[in-house]
Image (tube, rainbow, N blue to C red):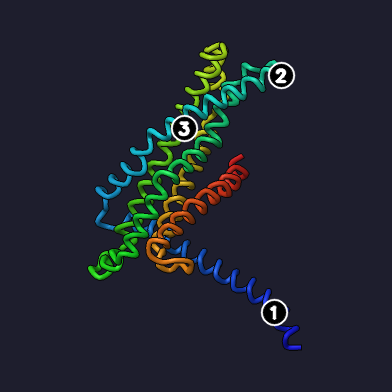
Amino acid sequence: MNLFLSSLLTPCATIGRIVIESTNACGAYAIFSFQGLYKIFSYPFQFSKILQQIYFIGAKSVSIIALVALFTGMVMGLQLYYTLTQFGSEGALGSALALSLVRELGPVLTAIMIIGRAGSSMTAEIGIMRISEQIDALDTMAIDPVRYLISPKIAASLISFPLLTALYDVVGIIGGYLAGVVLLGLNKGIYFYRVETSVLMQDVTGGFIKSIVFAFLVSTICSYQGYFTHMRPDGFGAKGVGLATTSAVVMSCVSILIADYVLTSILL
C-alpha cells in the first residue's frame, strides 16, 4: 500500500518542485530586472559607463546589422516579386517589403543579431566576474554590483536597440530596391511611392515599442544568467559560464518570439 501511494505521489512531488522552482526563478528575475532599471536613475549618474556600453552594444553592432538587413531585404525582394507576379501585383512590392520589415523583421532580427554578438558576451563577462569573485569584491568595497554592472547595460540597450532597428529598416528597404528595381526592373517611382504611402506612423511606433521591450528582455536575461552563474546546479566555474551563456542566448531568443506575438496582438 505504501509503495502504491509512493508511486502516485512521486510525479505530483516532481511537478510541484518544478512549479515552485520556476516561480522562485521568475520572482528573482523580476526583482533583479526592476532593480537594474530603477538604479539607472540613481545619483551619481553613470554617463561614462552608459556611453561605453552604447559603443559596445550599439556602435560595434552596426556593421553586422547593416549586412544582415541588406541581404534580408534583397532575399525578400526576390521572393515577394516572384510571388506577387503570379497575381499581377508586383507594384505592391514596396508596400509588402516595407511593412514586413518595419512591423516584424526589423525589431526581431535586430534583437537576435545583438543577442549573438553582444548578449552572449555580456553573460560571459558578468559570469567570469562572478566566479573570479570580482562581484564579491565590489560588495566588500560597498559598491552596488547591480548599479555598477547591470544598470549601464540596460540603459545602453534601451538606447541602442531602437536606433539599430531603424538602421535595419532603412538598409532592408534599400536591399529590396536593389533586388526589385535594379535586378528585376520594377519601376523605381512605384517602389518608393508604395513604401511612402503604405508605412504609417503607427507602424513605425509599433516597431520601436517592440525594440524597447526586446532591449529590456535581452539585457536583463543575459545579465541575470551571468550574475547568478554560481547558483547553477548543473555546473560551476568555466563550465557554468558556458552553460549560462548558452541559456542566456536560448532564453532571450524564445522570450523575444513570445513577446513579439503578444505585442503584435496588442498593437494591431
What's the residue type where badge 2 is placed? Phe
CA gap, disc 2 to disc 1? Answer: 61 Å
Of helix, strand and loop, which one carries label 1?
helix
Viewer-nearest of labels 2 and 1? 1
Tag 2 residue: 87
Give the label on residue 9, or none.
Answer: 1
Count numbered badges in the picture. Answer: 3
Foreground of the two, 228 or 203 = 228
Quarter of the view holding residue 145: bottom left
In the displayed structure, 261 sits above or below 137; it is above
Quarter of the view holding residue 18: bottom right
Question: Is residue 222 shown left or right of residue 201?
Answer: left
Question: Is residue 5 shown left or right of residue 115?
Answer: right
Find residue 74 and report its horizontal and vertical position in percent: 52, 24
Viewer-nearest of labels 3 and 2? 3
Of helix, strand and loop, which one carries label 3?
helix
Tag 3 residue: 68
